[in-house]
Image: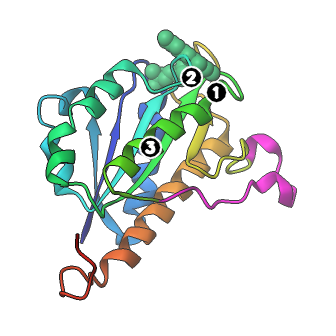
Amino acid sequence: MNTIAVVYHSAHGHTGYIAGKIAEGAASESLATVSLLKAEELIAAPEVLSRYDGLILGSPTYLGGVSAPFKALMDRTGGLWRQQKLKGKLAAGFTVSSLPSGDKQSTLQSMLVFCMQHGMIWVGNPVMPEQRAGVPCDEAANRLGSWTGLMAQAGHGAAADAFPPGDTRGAILFGRNFAQTVARFTCHDPVASGNGVTA
Ligand SMILES: Cc1cc2nc3c(=O)[nH]c(=O)nc-3n(C[C@H](O)[C@H](O)[C@H](O)COP(=O)(O)O)c2cc1C
């Protein structure tokens, strides 16, 4: 069974709620064994990241970027980078903020660049915005129209689970797509079998 970690920081529960829905989707159809890991707990043990076939990164958007605890984890992966321990793994990212835009794209971009620097393979969010098919906007998966990664939005000060239903369903679909992609990629490993290109 493939292993996937959803690695996230959440100060007030919103990102944690979406992380749980992503994990639910990734674990569906027996696609993978999924772990929910808190970024702040991994700062002391970043090597744990290298144990997984796929990583899904999640942070709230703080002032147009990842939160400080999430960045602290990123900055603790220098040793993994030097040893190329994350190279070739699949990765994806998601973010939550309180405003419809809120500069969430900037947060996803920093996760993408982080994963590129580690030589990882980025998996986006292929779910089409369902309002195009007539689904009411709040109920539509990918209602915010983000393909780089998953975006979700909950009002400022709202309960941790107070997302429009489309965001919750979109998170499940995002997790399922990621796990399906990991399953496709890990069924044959040309590097392990000696046919791959090595540096
Ligand atoms: C320091 C700080 C900066 C924030 N910056 C943004 C922002 O740039 N854009 C936005 O839409 N929301 C912003 N927010 C709101 C959070 O992204 C939002 O409340 C999010 O749901 C928090 O996630 P959490 O409950 O997982 O901690 C900010 C919140 C804080 C505390």
Picture layout, residue 78 above or below residue 71: below
Where's residue 40, x and y in %?
A: 25, 26
- Quadrant containing ligand 1 reads top right
Q: In the current view of this chain or complex, which residue is farthest to the top?
A: 157
Mark 1: which secondary structure?
loop
Task: Report the span colored magenta.
Answer: 123-139
Frontmost residue, 188 versus 25 = 188
Residue 28 within the segment the image draws in magenta: no
Q: Amino acid at mark 1?
A: Asp
Q: Amino acid at mark 2?
A: Gly
Q: For residue 133, which quarter of the picture? A: bottom right
- Any mark on residue 103, and which? 1
Q: CA distance from mark 2 to mark 3?
A: 15 Å
**Going from the N terminus, do you reach mark 1 or mark 2 first?**
2
Residue tagged 3: 113
For image coordinates 44% across by 40% down, the residue present is 111
Q: CA distance from mark 1 to mark 2?
A: 5 Å
The answer to whether residue 54 of the structure is visible from this angle is: yes
Q: Are marks 1 and 2 in contact (CB under 8 Å)?
A: yes
Q: Is mark 2 within 8 Å of ligand 1?
A: yes
Residue tagged 2: 64
Residue 136 within the segment the image draws in magenta: yes
Q: Amino acid at mark 3?
A: Val
- Crowd class of label 3 (few under 14; some 14 to 19; many from 20; radius 10 Å): few
Where's residue 197, x and y in %?
A: 28, 79
Mark 3: which secondary structure?
helix
Q: Quadrant of the C terminus?
A: bottom left
Q: Is residue 31 left or right of residue 17?
A: left
For image coordinates 50% across by 41% down, the residue present is 94
Picture layout, residue 30 above or below residue 84: below
